[in-house]
Amino acid sequence: AQSVTQLGSHVSVSEGALVLLRCNYSSSVPPYLFWYVQYPNQGLQLLLKYTTGATLVKGINGFEAEFKKSETSFHLTKPSAHMSDAAEYFCAVSKAGNNRKLIWGLGTSLAVNP
Amino acid sequence: GAGVSQSPRYKVAKRGQDVALRCDPISGHVSLFWYQQALGQGPEFLTYFQNEAQLDKSGLPSDRFFAERPEGSVSTLKIQRTQQEDSAVYLCASSARTGDNQPQHFGDGTRLSIL
């Protein structure tokens, strides 16, 4: 069965500092991997996705993530945090093939301090 | 429309009442998903439609939950005889075509509170 683990339910950084949100997955087959962001009282917005090809994926708002098969990881990074980045971030995985549902991590709440 | 639209945004019901939650997907999107998100948790898959066909309903927690998409566009999630544990945000998502690497686009959700 697939599963997603997000290390750290709360992460706090200073404005301008590096953002690193961790995601590890378990899957018996090559997965598709996603990061979504959720602002208060809003739906989920896709930040970036990995399907095939280049393992370093660039997304919106300056975020990027690297798929590391050997480490079963897909950590999300941003070189310099902005106040507007404060939100809940979810990592999700889907299995290549007929199963299209997303399996989600529990989320990481990012706080950005001035 | 421009995005996935869900209504109502907020719903309060008494325990035992039936509720119906509506989802308008992005026009032309083939796939439609329902998720349940409890407070402080990640979303949990409920059910999936491809056009009007419900291909996966393995996540529906009980037979009180029922979803339909009769014309392959608008979908309704119905919960009968609601219970307090049904309180959650219900998210609808749609994606174009049927490729499984297609991103899912989410609505803002319906926050359901059962008193």
Image (cartoon, coloured by chain):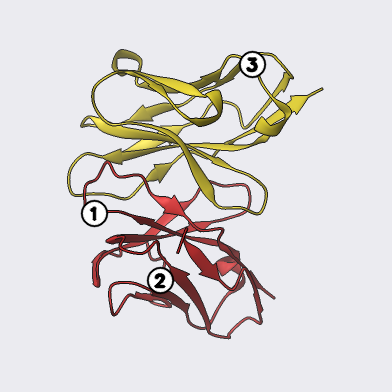
Chain colours: A yellow, B red
Q: Nearer the viewer, mark 3 or mark 2?
A: 3
Q: Nearer the viewer, mark 2 or mark 1?
A: 1
- Give x and y (percent) for residue B49: 28, 65
Q: Are marks 3 and 2 on the same chain?
A: no
**Residue occupied by mark 1:** B97
- Give x and y (percent) for residue B113: 65, 70
Q: Residue furthest bottom?
A: B17
**Residue occupied by mark 2:** B62
- Give the camera-side residue of A6 and B25: B25
Q: Residue furthest front?
A: B2
> B111 left or right of B91?
right
**Residue occupied by mark 3:** A80
Task: Identify the residue shown where x is 48% and y is 77%.
Answer: B79
Question: SS of the residue at dot 3?
Answer: loop
Location of residue B69 by image quarter: bottom left
- Tell which circle, 2 or 1, labels the residue nearer the N-terminal end: 2
